[in-house]
Amino acid sequence: MASPRIARLEAPLRVVAALVGTLPVALLSGVCLARFAPLSEGARGALGFSLVVPLWVAAMCVAFLARSAARAWGMCAALSAVLFALAYAVPQ
């Protein structure tokens, strides 16, 4: 069982993960959409830019559903790493 000090920090850490940790996920998702969507260049940019906020809200909802703050932060870090690799390491 976790110590009382860590248990007291569990909820605030999950909230911070949902608010701050999901922002890179949403931004990198928008970049990946703008990079790989089979549309014209202007349409891809508009699509990626306009979907950042809804993707951020969806990622926040998923982060709040995590069982612990560590899982929420781990999910944010893993998704950010994968999306970063897709956005910048994969050739178009």
Image (tube, helix red, strand yellow):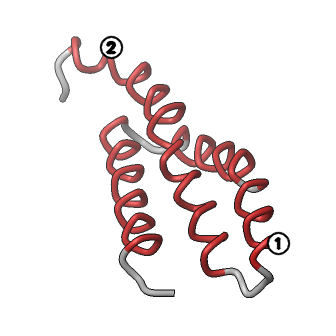
Q: Nearer the viewer, mark 2 or mark 1?
A: 1
Question: Residue at position x 78%, y 65% from top?
Answer: 47
Relative depth, front residue between 48 and 68: 48
Question: Residue at position x 50%, y 53% from top?
Answer: 25
- Find residue 71 and report its horizontal and vertical position in percent: 35, 46
Question: Residue at position x 23%, y 19% from top?
Answer: 6
Which residue bears the numbered disc 1?
Answer: 43
Number of the label disc, if any, that sits on residue 8: 2
- Find residue 65 and report its horizontal and vertical position in percent: 54, 43
Q: Secondary structure at mark 2?
A: helix
Number of the label disc, if any, that sits on residue 6: none
Relative depth, front residue between 11 and 83: 83
Question: Residue at position x 30%, y 40% from top?
Answer: 70
Q: Is residue 60 above or below residue 29?
A: above
Q: Amino acid at mark 1?
A: Ala
Relative depth, front residue between 88 and 65: 88
Residue 10, image quadrant: top left
| Cα gap from disc 2 to disc 1, whole angstroms | 46 Å
Image quadrant where one finds the N terminus:
top left
Query: Along the horizontal axis of the image, is 25 left or right of 67?
Result: right
Q: Is residue 21 above or below residue 42?
A: above
Query: Along the horizontal axis of the image, is 71 left or right of 34?
Result: left
Q: Amino acid at mark 2?
A: Arg
